[in-house]
Image: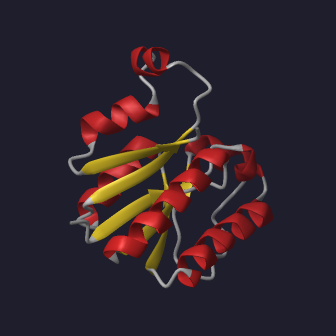
């Protein structure tokens, strides 16, 4: 089954859904979970993350409004980490800088990930997302492990 799971997290609704799905799945299979926060280059131009302090090494998406506020992002990351710890899940945090698909591809290879979980908001129709070359579509082409796209209902 899945021994190592990577969860892309940025505190938005989609990533919270992904985190909840990870917790539910982890209770059944007891994997090692890697919480990934990605700082995009666009976020860095607005704020310098070179002095960003994390209690634990972390990673995930910061190309959201939360990326504009380091303190708020730190609270979101800590909350996600605490939820995983409360569920007694072995958890590692990673902070990476780059484009989300590139970073997820790199980290999934580096960490020998069996399953990547990402969140998805159903704001656009499925066909528009796929034809538009969205992150989800690019991810399925580049990541060589299983991918679970957790969506709101």
Is 90 located above or below residue 33 in the figure? below
Residue in the foreground of this view, choosing between 33 and 17? 17
Do we see residue 17 in this rendering?
A: yes
Residue 27 in percent (x, y) is at: 42, 74
Lateral position of residue 57 relative to residue 109, left or right: right
Is 52 located above or below residue 132 in the figure? below
Lateral position of residue 74 relative to residue 117, left or right: right
Quadrant (top left, top right, bottom left, bottom right) of the N terminus:
bottom left
Colouring chosen for the image of the structure: secondary structure
Residue in the foreground of this view, choosing between 3 and 25? 25
Q: What is the quadrant of residue 52 in the picture?
A: bottom right
Q: How many marks?
A: 0
Lateral position of residue 66 relative to residue 81, left or right: right
Residue 4 in percent (x, y) is at: 30, 69
Quadrant (top left, top right, bottom left, bottom right) of the C terminus:
top right
User: What residue is rendered at 66% in x and 49% in y?
Assistant: 12
Residue 80 in percent (x, y) is at: 61, 69
User: What residue is rendered at 20% in x and 47% in y?
Assistant: 144
Do we see residue 33 in this rendering?
A: no
Lateral position of residue 32 relative to residue 121, left or right: left
Residue 95 in percent (x, y) is at: 51, 65
User: What residue is rendered at 58% in x and 83% in y?
Assistant: 86
User: What residue is rendered at 68% in x and 44% in y?
Assistant: 64
């Amino acid at each position: 089954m899945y021994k190592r799971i990577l969860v892309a997290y940025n505190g938005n609704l989609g990533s919270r859904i992904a985190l909840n799905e990870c917790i539910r799945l982890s209770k059944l299979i007891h994997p090692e979970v890697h919480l990934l926060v990605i700082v995009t280059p666009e976020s860095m131009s607005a704020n310098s993350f070179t002095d960003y302090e994390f209690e634990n090494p972390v990673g995930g998406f910061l190309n959201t409004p939360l990326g504009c506020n380091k303190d708020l992002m730190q609270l979101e990351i800590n909350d996600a980490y605490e939820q995983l710890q409360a569920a007694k899940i072995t958890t590692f945090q990673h902070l990476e800088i780059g484009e989300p698909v590139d970073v997820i591809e790199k980290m999934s290879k580096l960490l020998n990930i069996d399953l990547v979980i990402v969140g998805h908001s159903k704001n656009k129709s499925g066909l528009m997302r796929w034809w538009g070359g969205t992150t989800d579509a690019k991810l399925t082409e580049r990541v060589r492990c299983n991918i679970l796209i957790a969506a709101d209902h």
